[in-house]
Image (tube, rainbow, N blue to C red):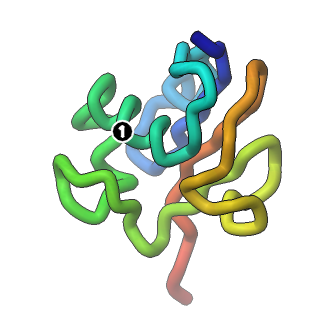
């Protein structure tokens, strides 16, 4: 198992729910694996980032940062995770 850190940022959450927390993921896990694991562990709280409840496809406006860099600039969902990584999920602010 590999311990990483996760932050879930979204409107409607209490301030303490924005704090990073440790999460155990499998050895050699990718961002895609983490999405599946978080969806299983935090169903309702995590589903806001998903296109459909129960799926593992992210909404178009979901942004995922791995150690401060957008996962898109890495290898997307295939980005490998290492011990101590910080992964942040957030919804992009849009509108005028």
Q: Position of residue 67 (x, y in %)?
A: 80, 42
- The quarter of the picture where the N terminus appears is top right
Q: Is residue 96 left or right of residue 82?
A: left
Does 26 sit left or right of 75 as displayed? Answer: left
Q: Nearer the viewer, residue 76 or 70?
A: 76
The residue at 45%/50% (across/down) is 11
* Quadrant assignment for the C terminus: bottom right
Within 10 angstroms of label 1, few (less than 14), some, or many (20 or more) residues?
Answer: some
Q: Measured from the top left, where is residue 59 in percent x and y?
A: 38, 67
Relative vertical location of residue 87 with respect to residue 59 in this rendering, above or below:
above
Classify residue 29 as left or right of residue 37.
right
* Residue under the image location 60 percent in, 34 percent down: 7
Toward the right, the furthest residue is: 68
- Asked whether 77 or 22 is in front, the reply is 77
Image coordinates of residue 33 in percent, x first then y, are: 46, 39
Q: For residue 39, which quarter of the picture? A: top left
For the image, the number of numbered tags is 1
- Residue at the location (31% across, 28% down)? 42
Residue under the point 75% across and 60% down: 74
Image coords of residue 88 (percent x, y): 63, 43
Q: Quadrant of residue 19?
A: top right
* Residue of label 1: 36
Answer above or below: position of 89 versus 84.
below
Seen as rendered, the residue at the extreme front is 28
In the rendered image, the residue lying farthest to the bottom is 96
């Amino acid at each position: 198992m590999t311990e990483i850190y996760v932050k879930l940022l979204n409107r409607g959450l209490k301030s303490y729910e924005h704090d990073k927390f440790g999460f155990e993921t499998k050895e050699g896990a990718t961002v895609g694996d983490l999405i599946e694991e978080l969806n299983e562990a935090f169903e309702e709280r995590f589903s806001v980032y998903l296109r459909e409840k129960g799926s593992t496809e992210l909404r178009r406006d979901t942004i995922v940062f791995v150690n401060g860099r957008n996962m898109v600039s890495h290898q997307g969902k295939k980005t490998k995770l290492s011990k101590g990584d910080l992964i942040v999920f957030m919804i992009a602010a849009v509108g005028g």
